[in-house]
């Protein structure tokens, strides 16, 4: 008995495989089409204003007429301008104090609300966040009216509870105007950062906290040794946001006190506004000098961002 096996078809000759070309965003018309709006937006609204401001800081422009190249003269005027030094001190003090207090207070509030019942947490989160939903301009106007020396709600409340001796012109005294602005800033922004910390607390593994309780750790020990270290990346982000916000503060101090009295609440941003739309200092056209101060604020904010980023990256 014989068996036959079917003949196998000869294997096809291997053809030449086409080398696939990687499709990158810069090598295809579609990629260029999608990135073009973002590039145009960045160039028109970010790159051009920054470069234009830097160029104006090197001129004698007043914003309306002709101008000539002045070199670094505008930057030299800053060294002898007492109002600039005062505004720089106010900006630094405001940034440091608000960064520390807002970070600490928002973290403490988040820990307290997170440790409480879930039903009441919704109410507390809403109440604490409500001030952040109001614009800074409206907030400044409301507090300015409420702090009016004679008819303000705050002084009237002090008188109603028998503390009339504490009545004060809070926004009219050089010793109290900046602390008052800082308190209003804390009232307005702490709730927002509290929500950020509260959301981060939801990502903490409950098993770790339970293990700490089994080992005998109390609430304070658990929060300090376990919860807070696990929130360190979020703390660094909140600190960075506070620093950048403090360096460019303008709304509250300008609306509440117009930078006064005697420039006691004048920040670098509000002083730039005063120079650009108000007067000149040291014989230097205000528009060019204001641009020079804007460049300084921009560079300081950039350096602060890089340092905070490198610190965070090094810790990781």
Image (cartoon, grey):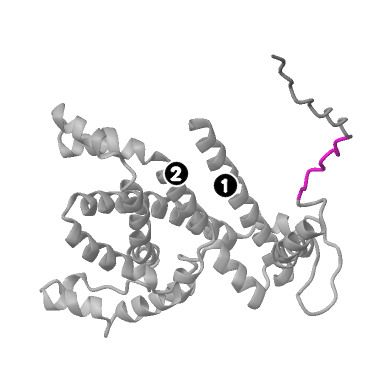
| 109 to the left or right of 200 | left
Give the residue furthest to the front: 1
Q: Which residue is mark 2?
A: 236
Element under disc 1: helix
- N-term mark: 1 or 2: 2
| 234 to the left or right of 64 | left
| 246 to the left or right of 111 | right
Q: Which residue is mark 1?
A: 305
Q: Residue at x 60, y 72 (%)?
A: 273
Element under disc 2: helix
Q: Residue at x 65, y 51 (%)?
A: 299
Depth order, front residue of 21/200:
21
**Residue 133, disc:** none
Q: Quadrant of the N terminus?
A: top right
Q: Residue at x 71, y 18 (%)?
A: 3
Question: Total of numbered circles in the picture?
Answer: 2
User: Which range is magenta?
Assistant: 16-24
Prevailing secondary structure class for the magenta stretch in the rendered image: loop
Quick check: 20 above or below 99? Answer: above
C-beta proximity under 8 Å, tags 1 and 2: no
Location of residue 216 in the rendering, given as x and y in whole percent from the top left corner = 13, 28
């Amino acid at each position: 008995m014989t068996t036959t096996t079917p003949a196998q078809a000869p294997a096809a000759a291997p053809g030449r495989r086409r080398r696939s070309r990687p499709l990158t965003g810069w090598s295809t018309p579609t990629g260029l089409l999608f990135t073009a709006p973002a590039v145009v937006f960045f160039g028109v609204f970010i790159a051009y204003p920054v470069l234009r401001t830097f160029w104006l800081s090197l001129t004698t422009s007043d914003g309306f007429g002709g101008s000539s190249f002045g070199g670094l003269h505008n930057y030299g005027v800053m060294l002898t301008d007492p109002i600039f030094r005062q505004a720089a001190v106010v900006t630094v003090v405001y940034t440091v104090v608000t960064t520390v207090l807002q970070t600490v207070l928002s973290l403490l509030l988040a820990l307290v609300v997170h440790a409480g019942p879930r039903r009441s947490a919704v109410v507390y989160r809403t109440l604490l966040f409500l001030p952040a939903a109001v614009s800074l301009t409206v907030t400044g106007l409301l507090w300015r009216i409420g702090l009016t020396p004679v008819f303000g709600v705050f002084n009237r409340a002090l008188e109603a509870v028998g503390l009339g001796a504490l009545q004060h012109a809070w926004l009219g005294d050089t010793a109290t105007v900046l602390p008052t602005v800082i308190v209003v800033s804390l009232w307005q922004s702490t709730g927002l950062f509290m929500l950020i910390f509260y959301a981060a607390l939801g990502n903490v593994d409950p098993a770790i906290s339970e293990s700490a309780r089994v080992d005998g750790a109390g609430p304070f020990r658990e929060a300090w040794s376990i919860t807070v270290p696990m929130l360190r990346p979020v703390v660094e982000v909140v600190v960075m946001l506070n620093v950048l916000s403090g360096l460019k503060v303008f709304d509250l101090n300008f609306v509440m006190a117009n930078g006064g009295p005697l420039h006691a609440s004048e920040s670098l941003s509000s002083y730039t506004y005063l120079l650009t739309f108000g007067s000149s200092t040291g014989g230097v056209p205000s528009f060019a000098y204001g641009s020079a101060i804007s460049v300084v604020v921009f560079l300081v904010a950039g350096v602060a961002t890089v340092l905070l980023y490198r610190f965070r990256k090094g810790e990781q």
